[in-house]
């Protein structure tokens, strides 16, 4: 198991290196002068020369790449050209939002998708099955941003002044703040240190932070703000998970040992949940892992609709503004997370199916 | 006697035809309710795309200011549903530039279908070549191609497409190329897998022994095996491609205004969703129906052509 994990991690290195090369190349290939894009009218020849030297853009491309690699290995993603701030800091501010959004979307997708798939499989070819699968088919075909806008219209406008009203933008209501747990608990930590960044990252997960510190009104507000974007983002993964669960369950349910289990007189519940589901889990887990990638892509659209300052939105803005350091850092982080999640999925096979030996 | 023989030969020929792989597949597709529904929808969409000039009551990019008495972002007005007869009829209302939304949605069918088919066409073309070379020759060539594709697959497809479009510059054709590129790995893998499964089989060896060239063996003997999975994957892929293309246009990176593309229409009116929801609603529904058609057909084809694939 350990050996396998190490081997898989080593195998991920060339992929990660490839990701670095691709993002580096793409960022350089984006046409237009970053100096002119950033400084606009102020971009005189003189100013631009200093700008180019400051960001090392005058050096040969391979030198730039090696400097870039060296910095990344030290955890330094450079300075954002547009914000003139370290990219790592921006990442710490923005990533928690996307993690929260992605996680809650995945939670909704699994919590509804898996039971729906199981339900459809045991009611195979009945009206209920058809309805569930029609729903799933429509779910995969819906544009995320369209659903987001429609949900915003229904819940923020049509249901205004009812208890079902939900806010269409932002993370918290204006005036509401989530006080970081390390301030409340008087954890003294020097600004700018690694520990500080880690604490700051955790504190920026508003739902988690307000939950552990008992700021209940903030927690409720943060959750209310999360509902619409998460639901919009969860539909496609939910539908895909439901379909996969159904087909995987159908495959298992027709096997002999299921008939044996039924013949033994076990209840439907035990047969389905204990005997069948456990064996049907493998492809479901795999597809959940793959959906994480879709969540990040969907986050670009969802965040821009719901006015959320997350990773997806800043990445999109950085691409249009040619902010190289941000484009590189965020793409690398997203791709690396994706690779990591799928590694975890592969490793989880052993726990789900004891027949699998990963040596 | 001769007559007898020829009758039998005809009968054999008939039986053979009736049971040929394609016929059997067609018959199985006929039993797939999903595929039939999908094909009917797609048929209607194709008709709408072809007959757009006949069906659309207005020119999709014509600004109606001064042409008739209608305002900006007006709600749908349908005479049959009680809209006063003296007002001009706009089934889906008008948009921010006072254009007829219904006509724009109808013309939009052309763009989406074109985008979907072409992007996936590119992806299958390039992917099949890469996959075939990779699987057939193996060795370091296979290693390099597959690692490059792994890297491409490590990016969420829409993000990579956004990045590629920003390199190429926004626009319909660049969006198409970007979506084509990000879809390549899927098809390359499908072809490579089917090449690997058949390349050691006896009939391939026989062809080699007969002195067949690599080209001949690959194209005539091996690649036909990857056609069924490519059709299935391709159909499902067209749905995703249309969805991604619309997303790019929505973000302002794909088709540019005033082109009546659904994603562009949605994107340019997104801030008006509270005041004029119809401008967002109809293009979205159009995207959904189109993608749904391809997904239904893809599912049906998969079950009909290769039931084993239904778990992947």
Image (cartoon, rainbow, N blue to C red):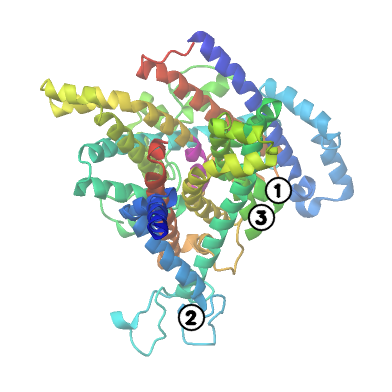
**Which mark's residue is nearer the viewer, 1 or 2?**
2
**Which mark's residue is nearer the viewer, 2 or 3?**
2
| Location of residue A69 in the rendering, given as x and y in whole percent from the top left corner | 73, 25
Q: Which residue is mark 3?
A: B174
The prevailing secondary structure element of the residues shown in magenta is helix
- Say which mark, if any, is on residue B54: 2
Residue most toward the front? B1
Which comes before the other along the chain, label 1 or label 2? 2
Q: Which quadrant: the C terminus of chain B? A: top left
Image-based side of A214 in relation to A52, left or right: left
Q: Within the magenta stretch, is there residue B305?
A: no
Q: Residue at x 86, y 40 (%)?
A: A50
- Say which mark, if any, is on residue A297: none
Check the image and report above or below for A31 versus A255. Answer: below
Chain of residue at mark 1: B
| Location of residue A183 in the rendering, given as x and y in whole percent from the top left corner | 47, 23
Residue most toward the bottom? B86
Query: How far apart are the alpha carbons under marks 2 and 3?
Result: 30 Å
Secondary structure beneath label 1: helix
Q: Residue at x 23, y 38 (%)?
A: A119
Please state the extent of the stretch shown in magenta in the rendering: A293-301
- Say which mark, if any, is on residue B167: 1
Q: Nearer the viewer, residue A186 or A268?
A: A268
Secondary structure beneath label 2: helix
């Amino acid at each position: 198991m350990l050996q396998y994990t190490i081997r898989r991690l080593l195998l991920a290195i060339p992929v990660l290196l490839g990701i670095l090369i691709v993002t580096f190349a793409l960022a350089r290939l984006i046409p237009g002068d970053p100096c002119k894009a950033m400084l606009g009218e102020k971009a005189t020849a003189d100013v631009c020369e200093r700008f180019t030297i400051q960001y090392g853009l005058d050096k040969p491309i391979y030198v730039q790449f090696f400097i870039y690699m060296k910095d990344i290995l030290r955890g330094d993603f450079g300075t954002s050209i547009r914000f003139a701030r370290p990219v790592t800091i921006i990442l710490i501010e923005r990533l928690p939002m996307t993690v929260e959004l992605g996680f809650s979307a995945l939670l909704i997708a699994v919590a509804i998708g898996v039971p729906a798939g199981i339900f459809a499989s045991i009611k195979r070819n009945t009206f209920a099955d058809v309805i569930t699968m029609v729903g799933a088919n429509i779910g995969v075909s819906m544009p995320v941003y369209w659903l987001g806008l429609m949900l915003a219209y229904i819940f923020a406008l049509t249901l205004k002044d009812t208890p079902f009203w939900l806010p269409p933008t932002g993370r918290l209501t204006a005036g509401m703040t989530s006080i970081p747990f390390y301030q409340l608990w008087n954890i003294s930590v020097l600004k700018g240190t690694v520990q500080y960044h880690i604490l700051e990252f955790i504190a920026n997960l508003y739902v988690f932070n307000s939950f552990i510190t008992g700021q209940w009104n903030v927690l409720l507000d943060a959750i209310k703000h999360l509902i619409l974007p998460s639901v919009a983002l969860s539909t496609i993964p939910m539908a895909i998970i439901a379909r996969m669960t159904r087909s995987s369950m159908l495959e298992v349910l027709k096997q002999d040992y299921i008939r044996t289990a039924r013949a033994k007189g076990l209840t439907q519940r035990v047969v389905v949940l204990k005997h069948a589901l456990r064996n049907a889990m493998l492809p479901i887990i795999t597809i959940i892992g793959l959906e994480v990638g879709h969540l990040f892509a969907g986050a670009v659209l969802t965040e821009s609709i719901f006015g959320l300052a997350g990773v997806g939105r800043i990445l999109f803005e950085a691409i249009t503004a040619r902010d190289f350091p941000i484009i590189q850092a965020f793409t690398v982080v997203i791709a690396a997370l994706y690779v990591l999640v799928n590694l975890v999925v592969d490793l989880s096979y052993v726990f789900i199916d004891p027949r699998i030996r990963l040596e | 006697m001769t007559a007898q023989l020829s009758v039998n030969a005809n009968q054999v020929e008939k039986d053979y035809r009736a049971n040929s792989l394609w016929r059997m597949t067609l018959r199985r597709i006929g039993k797939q309710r999903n595929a039939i529904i999908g094909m009917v929808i797609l048929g209607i969409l194709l008709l709408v795309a072809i007959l757009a000039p006949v069906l659309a009551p207005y020119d999709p990019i014509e600004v109606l200011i001064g042409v008739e008495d209608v305002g900006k972002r007006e709600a749908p007005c349908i005479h049959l549903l009680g809209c006063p007869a003296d007002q001009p009829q706009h089934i889906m209302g008008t948009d921010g530039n006072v254009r007829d939304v219904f006509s724009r949605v109808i013309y939009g069918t052309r763009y989406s279908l074109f985008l979907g088919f072409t992007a996936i066409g590119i992806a299958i073309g390039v992917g099949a070549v890469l996959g075939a070379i990779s699987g057939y020759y193996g060795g370091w060539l296979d290693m390099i191609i597959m690692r490059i594709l792994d890297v491409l697959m490590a990016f969420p497809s829409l993000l990579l497409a956004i990045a590629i479009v920003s390199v190429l510059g926004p626009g319909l054709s660049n969006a198409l190329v970007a979506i084509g590129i990000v879809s390549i790995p899927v098809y390359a893998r499908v072809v490579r897998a089917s090449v690997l499964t058949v390349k050691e089989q006896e009939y391939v060896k026989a062809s080699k022994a007969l002195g067949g060239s690599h080209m001949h063996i690959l194209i005539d003997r091996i690649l036909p095996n990857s056609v069924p999975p490519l059709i299935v994957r391709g159909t499902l892929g067209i749905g995703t491609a249309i969805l991604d293309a619309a997303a790019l246009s929505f973000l302002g990176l794909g088709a540019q205004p005033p082109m009546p593309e659904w994603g562009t229409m949605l994107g340019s009116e997104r801030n008006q969703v509270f005041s004029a929801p119809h401008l967002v609603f109809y293009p979205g529904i159009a995207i959904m129906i189109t993608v749904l058609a391809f997904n239904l057909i893809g599912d049906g084809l998969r079950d009909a052509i290769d039931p084993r694939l239904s778990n992947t």
